[in-house]
Image (tube, rainbow, N blue to C red):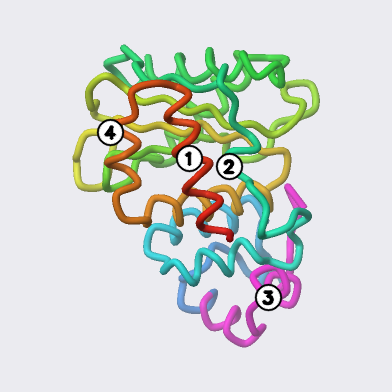
Amino acid sequence: MENEIMDTDQLAAYLERDAREVDKLATRGHLPGKKIAGQWRFASSEINYWIETQMPAYTEQELEALERRKRARCLVGEPLVTSMLSETTTAVALHATTKASVLRELVNLAEQSWQIYDADALHTAIKSREELGSTAMVGGVAIPHPHRPLSDKVQNESFIAFARASRGIHFGAPDNGLTDIFFLVSCRSSITHLRVLARLSRMMLQPGFLENLRNAESVAETLRLLEQTERELIA
């Protein structure tokens, strides 16, 4: 359901909430939707974007619930982030110094996954998403991604590219802080995309995780840390 229009009941099922609660949220302007002939209608792409904007305030329990959504096709207790990463899509000494150069370097890494058929289309997609609002968060992390899943002509399987910049750059974080850790996420379905964001968010909540990630001296050490953290999280 990448570009569907949903009514209140369908959205309630998608969000796994009561329809009356969804109607109240929409009426109060807390959900993106519009009334057509007196009935609420919601675009799935706008709803998924809304979920993304809410996620930084989620508790770990709420993030885990998002991972466990009934529509998810993969098991909760399996590696998700690290199954999409590889040594060739990981860099620990990115020399980019601007937002534009970071996005270009992330796309260059993504090409090493052999899952990208059209790098320019991917680059355009993540730039367009950043124009909607920066994916940078408090804590020095950003998760650039397309606004919606890319077509078969652009991408094959889902993948993640990871990069740590040599120094923090201005990427648009809400606290105006610098960003030095980047996860480029490009999934083939919106459900998988939201699950990956939730899993990454849970990993970042683990004590010492970001500090250890910044101190990792090699690609191999970085991947071991990510895998260990994710496996401990889902054990």
* Upstream in sequence: badge 4 or badge 1: 4
Rendered image: mark on residue 81: 2
* Label 4–label 3 contact, CB within 8 A: no
Q: CA distance from mark 2 to mark 1?
A: 8 Å
* Mark 2 residue element: helix
Q: Residue 129 in magenta?
A: no
Q: CA distance from mark 3 to mark 1?
A: 34 Å
Q: Residue furthest bottom?
A: 20
Residue visible at 33% across and 45% down? 137
Q: Is residue 176 left or right of residue 209?
A: left
Residue labelled with disc 3: 12
Q: Which numbered mark, 2 or 4, is in the foreground of this view?
A: 2
> How would you rate the neighbour count of disc 3 (Cα within 10 Å): few for under 14, some for 14-19, many for 20 or more?
some
Q: Which numbered mark, 4 or 1, is in the foreground of this view?
A: 1
* Label 2–label 1 contact, CB within 8 A: yes
Rendered image: mark on residue 226: 1
Residue visible at 62% across and 14% down? 111
Percent x, y for residue 66? Answer: 59, 64
* Upstream in sequence: badge 2 or badge 4: 2
Residue labelled with disc 4: 179
Query: Which region of the structure is painted magenta?
Result: 1-25
Percent x, y for residue 126? Answer: 52, 29
Q: CA distance from mark 2 to mark 3?
A: 28 Å
For badge 2, the amino acid type reads: Val
* Upstream in sequence: badge 2 or badge 1: 2
* Upstream in sequence: badge 2 or badge 3: 3
Q: Is residue 20 left or right of residue 1?
A: left
For badge 3, the amino acid type reads: Ala
